[in-house]
Image (spheres, grey):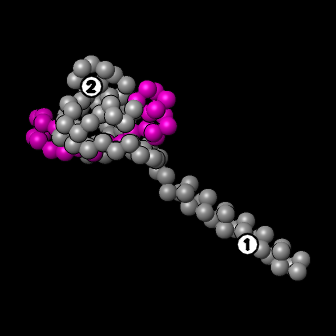
Amino acid sequence: MRRIVKVNKKLSALVCGLCLSVSAVAHHSAAQFDFQKPVQVTGVVKEFRAANPHMHLVLHVKDEKGERDITFEGHSMNNIYRSGWRRDMVKVGDTITVTIAPRKDGEDGGYVTSVTTASGQKF
């Protein structure tokens, strides 16, 4: 009986360790973004998802490159809430300006560091 308990404890520890390592590997780093060169992008909110692990934002943008949808990500919802954001502050159809850390590979998109609404509210 003692041997079975020892095996079960070891097996349980192994399974827990594997589960924790999978979630750690699943999260990506922010190394793909250039936080030293902030850029401002203005567009119309097409999608805003306040979810973990990061908020997700799609803006419809018209600029010198043309008209297109650009996808951004941002902080975790816990960090966003602590800075004063609420889910209803950004709605589909709103025109907003985001300050982002652009992607290092030059592709559209980036990491949102702040949002300014059409009324001038910044968060």
| Quarter of the C terminus within the rendering | top left
* Residue occupying image coordinates x 24% and y 20%: 119
What amino acid type should be assigned to the residue bearing mark 2?
Thr
Nearer to me, 4 or 36: 4
Work out how far the residue at label 1 is from the one at label 2, CA to CA, in angstroms.
53 Å
Q: Nearer the viewer, residue 70 or 37?
A: 70
Residue 114 lies, in percent from the top left, at: 36, 28
Whether residue 15 is situated above or below residue 72 in the rendered picture: below
**Badge 2 local density, few (<14 within 10 Å), some, or many (20+)?**
some
What number is the disc on residue 11? 1
> Cβ–Cβ below 8 Å for labels 1 and 2?
no
Question: Picture coordinates of residue 108 (x, y %)?
Answer: 25, 44
Q: Nearer the viewer, residue 111 or 15?
A: 15
**Visible residue check, residue 100:** no
Whether 69 is among the magenta residues is: yes
Label drawn at residue 117? 2
Residue at the (26%, 25%) spot, across then down: 117
Q: Is residue 44 on the magenta stretch?
A: no
| Bounds of the magenta segment | 61-85
Q: Which residue appears at 33% of the width and 34% of the height?
A: 88
Q: Does residue 86 sit above or below 70 in this rendering?
A: above
20 with respect to 110 (left or right) = right
The quadrant holding residue 42 is top left
Q: Which residue corresponds to the image point at 44% horizontal and 33% vertical from the top-left?
A: 80
| Residue kind at label 1, given as amino acid type | Leu
Secondary structure, mark 1, is helix
Q: Considering the image in quadrants, where does the N terminus appear?
A: bottom right
Query: Badge 1: few (under 14), some or many (20 or more) residues near its Cα, within 10 Å?
Result: few
Whole-percent x, y for residue 30 in the image: 44, 43
The quadrant in which residue 47 appears is: top left
